[in-house]
Image (tube, rainbow, N blue to C red):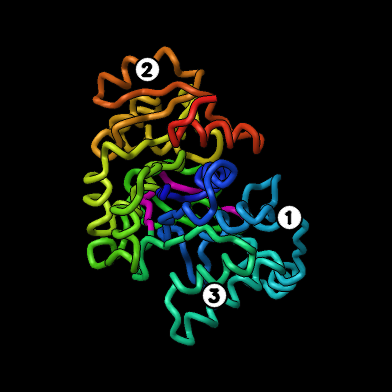
């Protein structure tokens, strides 16, 4: 069993690569829910949905989120009424959130509903939300942020939700702190700790370490479970030549006092994983990574095509071309 700690686009592509080289029923993922939000009365789970749509071959390839060939009539109506429209929900995507919210209100848990949605897309991979409890990533602004067309002006020191930072403000304002509200009271969802313990390999996906992987590890018991499997855990760096391919990971690392490099990633993951995979562009840093106490593997890590994603997956599970 291959288990992946997952959040967002990088994790979705990593899992898509693994699906090409590992039987699907031998794959599972523990997925970040810190990005989740309630909007229009609906429960929205961006990371779970991005992973599901990607693995089903239905993701919008231009954005890396949402559905391909989406329509936006509901959003257009919201804009006409002056409603909240900065968090774009396509018409078909709305169906996912309507179904999830209905099932949760009927008493089903998020793990069950996630499995139902995955099956509806023809997926046999096991997707596990890290917790059923309320867990929300919150960020504190390090500078004043002026009002925009869809956002009010905010002063430095204001704490906002992750989606207000990431989507509404296009992650353009510097951050001074990140916290995971509800983490101390949260419990791992059913099957999460057992899946980590039973995995032959644990993969830390090339996701943002501070806002995608950290909230997963913040749920009590999860970090300890991963540390206990350190020798079987392999991480893939989301930083290549000092930058993130997508999103604000490099800027967040710098703003929060970490080095935005593969060495910085090694320092964050060295207690969790025995091995770090870095891109060929960072080959000169392999010795520095190993000086941090991790075995370093150099390989192409940009998953720009399915073939490249599969090649990286083979490296991750120990196969060599």
Image position, residue 3 (x, y; %): 41, 49
Give the residue pinned by disc 2: 286
Q: What stretch is highlighted in magenta?
A: 137-149
| Residue 211 versus residue 275 in the image, above or below | below
- The crowding category of the residue bearing disc 3, from other C-alpha atoms within 10 Å (few below 14, some 14 to 19, many at least 20), is many
Image position, residue 114 (x, y; %): 50, 68
**Res 271 quadrant in image:** top left
**Which of the two labelled residues, at mark 3 and mark 1, occupies the earlier sequence position?**
1
Image position, residue 210 (x, y; %): 37, 44
Q: Is residue 65 left or right of residue 70?
A: left
Give the residue pinned by disc 1: 68
Q: Is residue 142 visible?
A: no
Q: What element carries label 3?
A: helix
- The crowding category of the residue bearing disc 2, from other C-alpha atoms within 10 Å (few below 14, some 14 to 19, many at least 20), is many
- In whole angstroms, how far apart are the C-alphas of marks 3 and 1? 20 Å
Which residue is painted at 61% across and 32% down in the image?
A: 308
Between 42 and 217, the one nearer to me in the picture: 217
Between 156 and 48, the one nearer to me in the picture: 48
Q: What element carries label 2?
A: helix
- In whole angstroms, how far apart are the C-alphas of marks 3 and 2? 44 Å
- In whole angstroms, how far apart are the C-alphas of marks 1 and 2? 38 Å
């Amino acid at each position: 069993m291959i288990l992946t700690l997952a959040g967002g686009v990088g994790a979705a592509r990593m899992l898509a690569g693994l699906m090409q080289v590992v039987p699907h029923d031998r794959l599972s993922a523990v997925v970040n829910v810190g990005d989740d939000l309630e909007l229009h009365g609906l429960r929205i789970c961006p990371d779970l949905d991005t992973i599901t749509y990607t693995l089903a071959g239905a993701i919008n390839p231009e954005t890396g989120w949402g559905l391909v060939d989406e329509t936006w009539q509901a959003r257009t109506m919201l804009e006409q009424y002056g409603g909240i429209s900065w968090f774009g929900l396509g018409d078909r995507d709305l169906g996912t959130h309507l179904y999830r919210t209905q099932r949760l209100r009927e008493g089903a848990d998020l793990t069950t509903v996630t499995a139902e949605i995955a099956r509806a897309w023809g997926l046999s991979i096991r997707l596990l939300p890290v917790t059923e409890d309320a867990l929300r990533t919150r960020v504190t602004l390090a500078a004043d942020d002026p009002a925009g067309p869809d956002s009010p002006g905010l002063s430095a020191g204001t704490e906002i939700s992750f989606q207000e930072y990431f989507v509404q403000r296009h992650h353009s304002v510097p951050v001074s702190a990140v916290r995971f509200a509800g983490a101390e009271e949260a419990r791992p969802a059913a099957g999460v700790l057992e899946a980590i313990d039973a995995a032959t390999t644990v993969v830390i996906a090339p996701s943002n370490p501070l806002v995608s992987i950290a909230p997963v590890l913040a749920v009590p018991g999860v970090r300890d479970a991963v540390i206990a499997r350190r020798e079987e855990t392999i991480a893939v760096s989301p930083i290549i030549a000092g930058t993130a391919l997508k999103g604000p990971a490099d800027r967040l690392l710098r703003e929060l006092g970490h080095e935005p490099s593969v060495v910085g990633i090694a320092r964050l993951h060295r207690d969790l994983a025995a091995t770090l995979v870095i891109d060929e562009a960072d080959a000169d840093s392999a010795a520095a990574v190993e000086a941090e106490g991790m075995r370093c593997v150099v390989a192409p890590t940009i998953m720009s095509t399915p073939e490249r994603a599969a090649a990286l997956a083979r490296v991750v599970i120990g196969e060599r071309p």
